[in-house]
Amino acid sequence: MVFASMKTQYFPPAPTFTEKDVGAQTGKVFIITGGNQGVGFELIKMLYPTGATVYMASRSEERAAEATKIITSSDPSNASRLKFLHLDLSDLNSVRSAAQKFAKQKTRLDILLNNAGVGGEPVGSKTKQGIELHIGVNVIAPLLLTQLLHPQLRTAATSSPKASVRVIWTSSWMIECDHFNETSKRYGKDSVISVVQNPGNLQTNIYHTQSRLMMLFVNRILYPPKMGAYTTLFAGLSKEITEANQGSYIIPWGRVQEINPRKDIYEVIEKGKGKELWEWCEKQIKANRDTTNKLVVCMQLENIEDCIAMIA
């Protein structure tokens, strides 16, 4: 069963939902993390002609500007619909700032694509808050961002067709199901659909730490980022995804995984492990928030000893 799942994801059939199937998205608002390169960049290229307002959330304003110039060159008159949102997932304070900035500009959010992530980083790499980098960037930061943007998602859901407001989490065939399905349980009552996607094995920057020798072999089974964008396009806009697909796993190049071969993972989630992981992430977020608040107060104290005692 696991081998069959690997095979269909490594060698998927042609996409059935492409940019040609996407109608007008005027009035809709999208946030795409990591939108200046790879899958995010290709997806924004597909969305730009639809009339949607798209926020390209990324760390580098310079690289985002370069990507924006390329995308908007097809229709410069509508360049204002593509906006930059500074977001560094390795810093929870940056996540909070991004959410606050967005909230000042928009009251609704139709699609949140948690696309950005890291992989293969050196052992010992940490976030600004001292959290293991992969856990911090791929798990905790996207969860915080989603929580902070929930009011805008909920607002969009009240005035949108059923199952059209969605949060998309990016995973891989190796995980296939994780704590992000907990989102579907918590936000489902607000008509916000949450799905997990494996965009596919793609030629992206995720492999930048790997050796040339390894990439010589890996490149044989990698596809262009545009193919991964088709997976995401399906996850975000296909009408095949309904309320019945809440918490589903989307596989390349836009299919709902009907049966997950990792039944053991589903079993532990049903027993509460997804809830436990969610709560653990919230503890990490709260710990950072408490420390930040202490530092703000600390800077207002005249006695350095009182400051040290407070932080300790």
Image (spheres, helix red, strand yellow):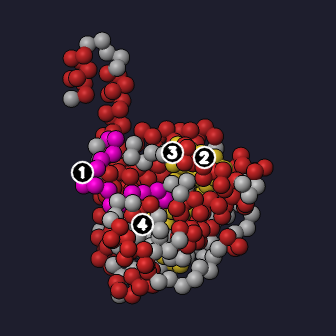
Label whose residue precedes the other's in the sequence (3 or 2): 3
Q: Amino acid at mark 1?
A: Gly
Residue at mark 3 to residue at mark 1: CA–CA distance: 23 Å
Q: Nearer the viewer, residue 51 or 249?
A: 51
Q: Is mark 4 in CB contact (under 8 Å) with mark 3?
A: no
SS label for mark 3: loop
Q: Is residue 307 above or below residue 32?
A: above
Is residue 56 in sight in this rendering?
Answer: yes
The residue that mark 4 highlights is 171
The crowding category of the residue bearing disc 2, from other C-alpha atoms within 10 Å (few below 14, some 14 to 19, many at least 20), is some
Percent position (x, y) of residue 15?
Answer: 59, 79
Q: Amino acid at mark 3?
A: Ser
The residue that mark 1 highlights is 124
Label whose residue precedes the other's in the sequence (4 or 2): 2
Give the farthest residue toward the right: 77
The residue that mark 2 highlights is 65
The kind of secondary structure the magenta stretch mainly shows is loop
Q: Is residue 278 above or below residue 7?
A: above
Q: Amino acid at mark 2?
A: Ala
Nearest to the eye among marks 1 and 4: give it.
Answer: 1
Percent position (x, y) of residue 142?
Answer: 44, 53
Residue 60: assigned label: 3
Q: Is residue 293 magenta?
A: no
